[in-house]
Amino acid sequence: MNSTVGILGLFDVATDLGLEKHDEDFGQTFGRWGVGNGAYVVVPFFGPRTARDAVALVLDVKTDPVANVGHIPTRNTLLAVRVVSDRANLLPADKVIEEAALDKYSYIRDGYLQRRRNLIHDGNAPREQDD
């Protein structure tokens, strides 16, 4: 809807029409298909991931319309704006982590894994099995 009526996504008309935003990626798709998490890793410049999500990141980058813009200066500008925007959106989380976490690594890891589980199951994650 935003790509057509919203002039190539410049305007968000879908929200006004009551359509939900779905932010999906290949890692969520693989998780929904039953592929396990694998090890938790932190990928430089991309942040926390599971092994499944790190492999899926390759597909996400390959299918990203911004990364596939042919005009290199335009592509690099769009990618830089995305990085700055993403970082600005994460600034409040930095403050929370500084104030709340005794062990930053485990705090971020556990939060990431819980969030991914929630995203994969669209907010209806099944109960975890006790070992």
Image (cartoon, rainbow, N blue to C red):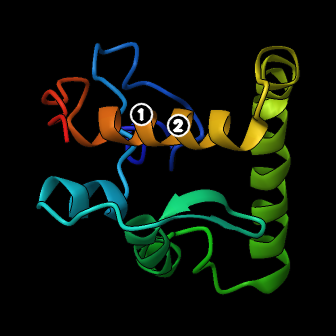
> Mark 2 and mark 1: span between their CA atoms?
6 Å
Q: Left or right: where does residue 95 sit relative to residue 110?
A: right
For the point 86% across and 14% down, the residue is 99
Q: Position of residue 96 (x, y in %)?
A: 79, 17
Q: Quadrant of residue 106?
A: top right
Q: Left or right: where does residue 57 sit relative to residue 117?
A: right
Amino acid type shown at disc 1: Gln
Task: Identify the residue position indicated by label 1 in the image.
Answer: 114
Image label count? 2
- Numbered badge on residue 43: none
Amino acid type shown at disc 2: Asp
Task: Identify the residue position indicated by label 2 in the image.
Answer: 110
For the point 30% across and 15% down, the residue is 17
Mark 2–mark 1 contact, CB under 8 Å? Answer: yes
For the point 63% across and 78% down, the residue is 69
Q: Left or right: where does residue 95 sit relative to residue 78?
A: right
Q: Nearer the viewer, residue 65 or 90?
A: 90
- The quadrant of the rendering that contains the N terminus is top left
Q: Position of residue 32 (x, y in %)?
A: 16, 53
What SS does tag 1 mark?
helix
